[in-house]
Image (cartoon, rainbow, N blue to C red):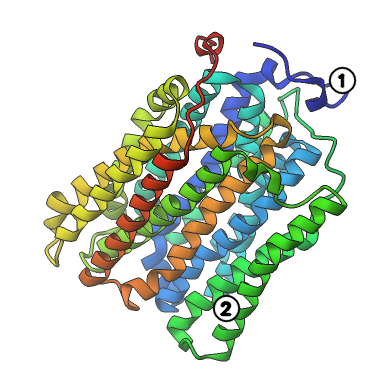
């Protein structure tokens, strides 16, 4: 394996290739923290609603407050990662995430919980792009695809542990303790991060695009605020109208501003030239559609199992595990195959299979026995479909980005995924009709299937296969 280019290493540091086993462990654990929190919160939503009140709106904001800051600031975090180094930014993110988790645990009201969740999103934004960018910097070729598959599989273990352990905690000692759980992986990860002897710093990024960051936060946050609050206040409420208008204007202004920054300072929040790479542009379009679908399905199904079928939290957590188990078992294999044969047909087949799984859920009714004939086989197919496309999608997108901009490239793709999920969660109230019901989950599954099929078609038409050099295929992890 060749060493990293000199331009990617600050003076005197050791190439990340020398620490790549440690890098992989750190990337997995860092992502584990973020994934664990996301997965445990879903099963706690009914308990949070019961204690703090606020109905479906509070449940949506508990999820989306986190996703708004995560999805918006992850773009800034990508630039910070390239400017100051992945290791330093990961460390800062873990500290912020840990402090915010403690505040979540002691939150006396729904408003305090929502604010703390927003700060958790800030910490998650700092961690997420840097974790994946470390892998991109330390690994090359087909072995990089395999490493990404391993990262996907093991970081997904958080999603396996989260629903079951979180459900047991919620049913046993209360929902507040689920936020304490995140302190354990944080305490283990920070000392490991400090042992990494190398880093990647792109010296050609002189400053961070603050105005672009504000436009992103206001744009995404305003649209989500309007979509969620309309359920409580109505579409004609001044707050809803103002939020939607301001959010839309900010999003419309974002691209022209980024073009201006590119011409003047050369340091935009989103380097638009990245989208000239076909796989980067098409991969992010597919991400928007596919992850929008996945964001809705896990939110809606978890609520349905508890609020309509009256499953205990831990049973609901166990019942939603099949997709993650499939992902854990097969991601490394799929990542390796995609590295050898290219990502195109994996990305096309995966969402199509998941769409079939979503449509199977249309068979469920009021009887909880429908889990075995509708929900379970549907979730298994969703899991198989996700597994086919996640690692190839990540490899296709990041494989088209120069190494020095891997942090911001990873951030853009993660931001697209998170924003897609938060928008569909915000729309869940509209799709569900204001409450969780059999008719509501049927509508949600149809929306999900349409989005997945769209992602499949986009991938089949737009993704170009790029095979890795044979010399890299046998490189050990």
Residue nearest the viewer, comparing 35 with 252? 252
Q: Quadrant of residue 214?
A: bottom right
Q: Which residue is mark 1?
A: 12
Residue nearest the viewer, comparing 266 with 239? 266
Q: Is residue 437 left or right of residue 79?
A: left
Q: Count residues near mark 1 (Cα–Cα under 10 Å), then give few for <14, some for 14-19, many for 20+.
A: few
Q: Which residue is mark 2?
A: 244
Where does residue 161 sit, x and y in percent of width and height? Answer: 39, 42
Where does residue 147 sit, x and y in percent of width and height? Answer: 52, 24
- Mark 2 vs 1: CB contact within 8 A: no
Task: Say if 418 sits above or below 281 in the image.
Answer: below
Q: Residue at x 25, y 61 (%)?
A: 305
Residue 254 seen by the camera: yes
- Local SS, label 2: helix
Q: Count residues near mark 2 (Cα–Cα under 10 Å), then give few for <14, some for 14-19, many for 20+.
A: many
Where does residue 257 sit, x and y in percent of width and height? Answer: 76, 62
């Amino acid at each position: 394996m060749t060493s990293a280019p000199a331009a990617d290493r600050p003076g005197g540091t050791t190439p990340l290739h020398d620490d790549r086993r440690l890098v992989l462990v750190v990337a997995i654990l860092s992502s584990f923290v973020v994934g664990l929190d996301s997965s445990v919160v879903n099963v706690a939503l009914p308990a949070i609603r019961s204690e703090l009140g606020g109905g479906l709106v509070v449940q949506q904001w508990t999820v989306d407050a986190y996703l708004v800051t995560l999805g918006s600031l992850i773009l800034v975090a990508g630039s910070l990662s390239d400017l100051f180094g992945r290791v330093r930014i990961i460390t800062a993110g873990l500290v912020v995430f840990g402090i915010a988790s403690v505040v979540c645990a002691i939150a006396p009201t729904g408003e305090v919980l929502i604010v703390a969740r927003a700060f958790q999103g800030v910490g998650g934004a700092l961690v997420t792009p840097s974790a994946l960018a470390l892998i991109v910097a330390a690994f090359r070729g087909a072995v990089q695809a395999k490493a990404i598959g391993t990262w996907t599989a093991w970081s997904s273990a958080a999603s396996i542990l989260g629903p079951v352990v979180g459900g047991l905690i919620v049913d046993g000692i209360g929902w507040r303790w689920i936020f304490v759980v995140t302190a354990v992986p944080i305490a283990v990860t920070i000392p490991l991060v400090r042992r990494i002897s190398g880093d990647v710093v792109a010296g050609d990024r002189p400053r961070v695009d603050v105005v672009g960051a504000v436009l992103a936060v206001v744009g995404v946050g305003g649209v989500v605020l309007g979509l969620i609050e309309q359920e409580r206040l109505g579409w004609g409420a001044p707050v809803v109208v103002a939020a939607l208008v301001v959010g839309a204007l900010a999003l419309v202004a974002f691209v022209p501003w980024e073009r201006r920054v590119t011409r003047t300072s050369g340091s935009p929040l989103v380097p638009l030239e990245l989208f000239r790479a076909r796989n980067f542009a098409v991969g992010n379009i597919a991400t928007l559609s596919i992850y929008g679908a996945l964001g809705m399905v896990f939110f809606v199904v978890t609520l349905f199992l508890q609020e309509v079928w009256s499953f205990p939290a831990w049973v609901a957590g166990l019942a939603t595990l099949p997709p993650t188990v499939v992902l854990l078992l097969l991601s490394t294999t799929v990542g390796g195959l995609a590295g050898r044969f290219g990502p195109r047909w994996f990305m096309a087949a995966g969402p199509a299979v998941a769409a079939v799984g979503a449509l199977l859920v249309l068979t469920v009714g009021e009887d909880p026995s429908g889990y075995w004939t509708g929900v379970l086989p549907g979730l298994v197919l969703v899991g198989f479909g996700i597994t086919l496309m996640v690692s190839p999608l990540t490899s296709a997108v990041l494989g088209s980005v120069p190494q020095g901009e891997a942090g911001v490239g990873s951030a853009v793709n993660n931001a697209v995924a998170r924003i897609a999920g938060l928008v569909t969660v915000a729309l869940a109230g509209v799709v569900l009709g204001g409450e969780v019901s059999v008719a509501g989950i049927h509508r949600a599954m149809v929306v999900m299937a349409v989005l997945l099929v769209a992602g499949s078609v986009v991938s089949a038409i737009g993704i170009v296969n790029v095979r890795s050099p044979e010399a890299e295929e046998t490189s050990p992890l």
